[in-house]
Amino acid sequence: MTRSFAKPASIADVAAAAGVSVPTVSRVLTGAAKVSAVRRQRVLDAIEELGYRPNGAARALVSGKQTTIAVMTSDTTIYGYSSTIQGIELAARAAGYFVIISLIDSDAPDDIDRAVSLVLSQPLAGVVVLKFDPAGVQVVGALPRDVPVVAVSGEIDGEFSQAVLDEVAGGHEITRFLLGLGHRTVHHVTVPPSRDEDGRTIGWRAALESAGAPVPPIIAATWEAVSGVGIGHHLADRDDVTAVFCGNDEIAMGVISGLAEAGRRVPDDISVVGFDDHPLSRIWRPGLTTVSQDFVDLGRRAFSLLLQQITGDEQPVLSSQNPTLVVRASAAPPRGPTA
């Protein structure tokens, strides 16, 4: 005989039964902001009627204090994402907070709503959003304004408290470095941007334009390093390419592999540089010239900004840091008449 079990009530069910929004239910559960006595009672009645009793929320209602923060991200495997989460976790643990990670499936509206509802069902002190991609951008906009939120990104928008690594400055500096070696222009391989263009691309273009250098068409890669291999094959057939700036180090490694498979040498024939200073970039051959971003510190700064909000500072605050150029062996002056 098959036994059937009733589906547990969700926070959305409570909101529907009480005739309020999901954020209102979350506010009642967490005490993060005031809710009118009438609405609070409707929510509590719906919770009782539906038997909705998240353990964490029950404890929070008793203690009156939340010590959990959520990190919302679309990925935990990419180097920059994982290292930023590490920094958040280290800083939060030192301050006596517990971190939960909520994955965002995509930037589709249903997935954004689902991710936000799931996070708001927890008794949270605040939320850190990794706004490195379209999903992160959408989630930041969907979170209620009375929940402490910090956005982590490479570009400044000023609406929320932000911990930023200034990718515009980094893209500008590494492009100027290649131009300074004597390259006529710099070709650019992008990783998927959070908006129309990411800061690395903006900095690349600005450096070329300020130098009066040609601005080549952008070449798009995926987040997978192997996508750089095919791009390397393609670039190997072009005599006009002497320098390539890749949107991250993994793609740069893929491009170098593709060029090598096609019989082209780096940096003798083509210089290739990356971005992020991935741990493998220093032992790659040739050693990868790149832009170093301290993602662990970025995560620490993000938690510090969140803690300021939790303790009462409601004004948006910006914490920005410039990446630094790291020169290794993958870039050199160009050779031949096409330079």
Image: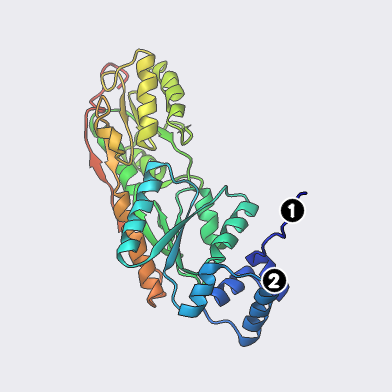
Give percent across and percent down for residue 317.
37, 67
Give percent across and percent down for residue 29.
55, 74
Q: Residue at x 59, y 55 (%)?
A: 112
**Going by the image, does 117 lie left or right of 288?**
right
Rendered-image quadrant of the C terminus: top left
Kindly state the secondary structure of the residue where label 1 is placed: loop
Q: Earlier in the sequence, mark 1 or mark 2?
A: 1
Q: Which mark is residue 3?
A: 1
**Going by the image, does 292 lie left or right of 187?**
left
Q: Is residue 19 visible?
A: no
Kindly state the secondary structure of the residue where label 2 is placed: helix
Give percent across and percent down for residue 39.
65, 82
Mark 2 lies on residue:
50
Q: Quadrant of residue 170?
A: top left
Real-space CA distance between mark 1 and mark 2, rounded to the nearest whole angstrom:
21 Å
Kindly identify the amino acid type of the residue bearing the numbered disc 1: Arg
**Going by the image, does 207 lie left or right of 120?**
left
